[in-house]
Image (cartoon, helix red, strand yellow):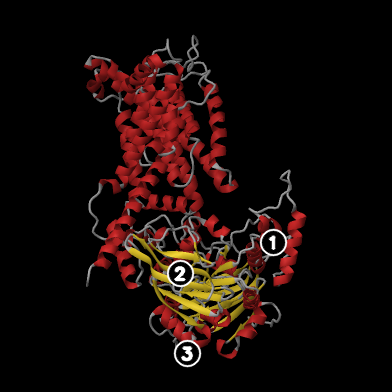
Amino acid sequence: MEQYAVEMLHITKRFPGIIANDDITLQLKKGEIHALLGENGAGKSTLMSVLFGLYTPEEGEIRINGKNAKIKNPNDANDLGIGMVHQHFKLVECFTVLDNIIMGVEPVNRLTFLQKKQAREKIMEMSKKWGLHVNPDALISDITVGMQQRTEILKMLYRENDILIFDEPTAVLTPQEIEELMQIMKNLAAEGKSILFISHKLNEIMAVADRCSVLRKGKYIGTVDIKDTTKAELSRMMVGRDVKFAVDKEESVPGEEILRVEQMSVASNEHSKDAVRNVSFSVRRGEIVCIAGIDGNGQSELVYGITGLAPLKSGSITLCGQNITKAPIRQRAGVMSHIPEDRHKHGLVLDYPLEDNMVLQRYFEPRFTNKMGFLKRREIRAYADKLIEQYDVRSGQGAITIARSMSGGNQQKAIIAREIDKNPELLVAVQPTRGLDVGAIEYIHKQIVAQRDAGKAVLLVSLELDEVMNVSDRILVMYEGEIVGEFDPKQVTVEELGLYMAGAKREAVKQ
Amino acid sequence: MNKKRFSPLRNEGVQMLLASLLCILGGLLIGFVVLLIIEPSGAFEAIIAILKNFFRFSRVNQRLKYLGQTLVRTAPLLMCSLSVLFAYKVGMFNIGAAGQYVAGACATLFCALYLKMPWWACMMAAMAAGALLGAISGALKTFRNVNVVISGIMLNWIMLYVTNTVLSLPGIKNPMSPYTIQIRGNSPTALLPQMGLQKLFNNEKSVTIAIPIAIIMAIVVWVILNKTKFGYELKATGYNYHAAKYCGMKENRNIILTMMIAGALAGMGASLLYLTGIEEWETTISSVPAMGFNGIAVAFLGGLSPIGSILAAYFIQHITLGGGNVDLSVYCAQISSLISSLIIFLCAFVGFFRLTMQNYLRKRDEAAAAKAQVKKGGRPS
């Protein structure tokens, strides 16, 4: 019989009104990389929470290394050698890499003084062995996302975990860093570590995994060997139907200029250097202009400047022929919709019900507020119900669901419904598909293209190269606050874009 | 999921009420134990005296008179709690309500005794003074990011001594005592009108329109927070400052405005007490009056709802006054403060009790759902 590192057999976990995991079986062989694939809400997180003892399943059993295991809390999981790199890292920003790695298992002498020297040697040795390059004395807040992730991996290895779980590890990385991570994962597996790789990016699963288990709507669909399968088959298993990877769209027919940005500079919150430096570009009616680049190269600040969330240091912005350089947010919002980068920070009032979030940008219109300043609750409900229906926003209790309790995909859909229904001249969409599954991404891309086809101007900011290549009509690459290249997606390769994104190449952009 | 069987436990209001009652019960119980430890023989009598307050009188007339007095002192407490909860809904902890209350007292008494203004002008002055103090906290918060708790506490003390100084002016302070002169007799137009309300309370002199005004204000606050565009904006700012900014609300203006309104509510509370003539300001007082701080407790005991605050304010005032009737030969005078502060302390657990209740209900639902599922699966289809 084959030896399994983790066996989760016939796990069933029910919540009121929903079965999150319905008879799910997951078997992770020793030394393999096993992908867990599924859309948002398919039950991946619940299954992992069961493995970490955060939920008790109603049925089923868990075996670790062939032995029955009772996991009541994350500490039990730790003792069994299970470690996890979360999608959002759990690191203390103002501590060094070294401090973060040893946190909780600090080596101390008899007088409880820290013995950092030993720890440092051990970490440097591990770092060399696995190719996990880190500077142990750097502060977390100063290092790149890639190095933060390597710190998380070292944290697991330092604890001598043999079962490593990676939750959507590539979402925040550059193409080059992803490449590196894949290699690290392969090395770890070759050394006998068992790896569970949670993802919905098919390319990566195809590249690195040995086997793949698929979940859909809480049900176990099956496990396949990667060498015997194709991307199309995996996506069919995940979504339950054929998925188009290419975005259907006609040739763009650009019209008049809607947005013009001239010599714009925006100060940075973190550095003394400006986050956006002397950027000029324009977006025309009927085209999707995409700002590509690695996270943190000034894209967020560029959008803040355009939407009015941050003041410009210099330069000017013209929207529909009007100078809006100093215009308040609400005046801009009349002709501009903004799907924000961070739906929790900017996009939603999480403690408000869905209906109140649906009118967040237009509650003050006479349609929703009478002359006395009272809200027209009935109108708001009717409007929210209409959007919920039209954009298929799913939630537990409809319009009165508290936004916080909704899934990320549906929260995003609600924002998109709200922003698109405003019928803007310019749509600014920042990473509109971040963290969403294939089905939702397909839907959102369709909506964006539909806006373009309706003669709107679209400014899309994306970190996903697939999205950049598929959706845009024109690509601007941003590197360290400047636009370093302008491309036609049909005439450029992903590799070429990567070079510009990493700052290895640049061209003078005609402005 | 759409059709839910009616269950009173699931109603938010009922949950709040139950949680508040649990706090009260817990506070009384712990208070009782403390009494037992100090002196077992009189403990039972003492706790009964606190709970009884005016019910200790056997004559109905007497009871009505003291009920009236309790209500008179409830009105300012309710206003302070409204001040606290209003700011809290917008994400700020208005510990400065105490100072805003003092500012209100200062302004209202100055206008009444020195300027001989009519009651409504005195009340406006109190609101303006409270609002000014609130605006200072709000402005410090928005422009200098000073926590309103810090600025509130400091302003409390600043305002206390400013008030002591102002109200010691000749013509305001009674030269024979540390108190201000009485409004009744000196500037009768400053007294709040009674509109016949005193007749309900055995002609208690201090019963005025202050009581209905406070209740109306509670309702107004509820309407503003829940029914208006203004309340929608304020709460959105409180819940998520960034989202408020994102959708073009004037988030900084909202914060200052909120603190001004909160200050005005607390300041108005002071005028609702002092303009009844029930007591005078003691110009040598060296601690900030407890009214504002108790307002915090009332707001939480009332489940942060303006309507709940009405009941909570009455209850806290009831036991505070009841505490005055404890046998002082057995217990020291502070014992009543101890009991009410125990209850107030436990008020902090209102949210905890509610959460526990909700968790229990959810667990029960989960179990029921699991059972139903098993049944369904077992049935041949």
Q: Percent x, y for residue A202?
A: 51, 80
- Identify the residue under disc 2: A337
Q: Is residue A277 visible?
A: yes
Q: CA distance from mark 3 to mark 2?
A: 24 Å
Closer mark to the observer between disc 3 and disc 1: 1
Is residue A459 left or right of B76 when viewed as pictured? right
**Residue type beneath disc 1:** Asp
Residue A403 location in percent, x, y?
40, 60
Amino acid type, label 3 = Glu
> Residue B300's quadrant in the figure?
top left
Q: Is residue A489 left or right of residue A447?
A: right
Question: Residue A427's x, y, as percent?
Answer: 47, 73
Give the alpha-carbon distance from disc 3 to disc 1, as whole Å: 43 Å
Depicted A427 relative to depicted B198: above or below: below
Q: Residues within 10 Å of mark 3 (few under 14, many from 20)?
A: few
Q: Name the residue located 34 percent from the left edge and 62 percent from the top edge.
A: A396
Closest to the observer, B355 or A414: B355
Residue at figure coordinates x 37%, y 53% from the top left: B229
Considering depth in this image, is A299 or A170 the residue closer to the camera? A170
Query: Do marks 2 and 1 share a chain?
Result: yes
| Residue, disc 1 | A142
Residue annotated with mark 3: A251
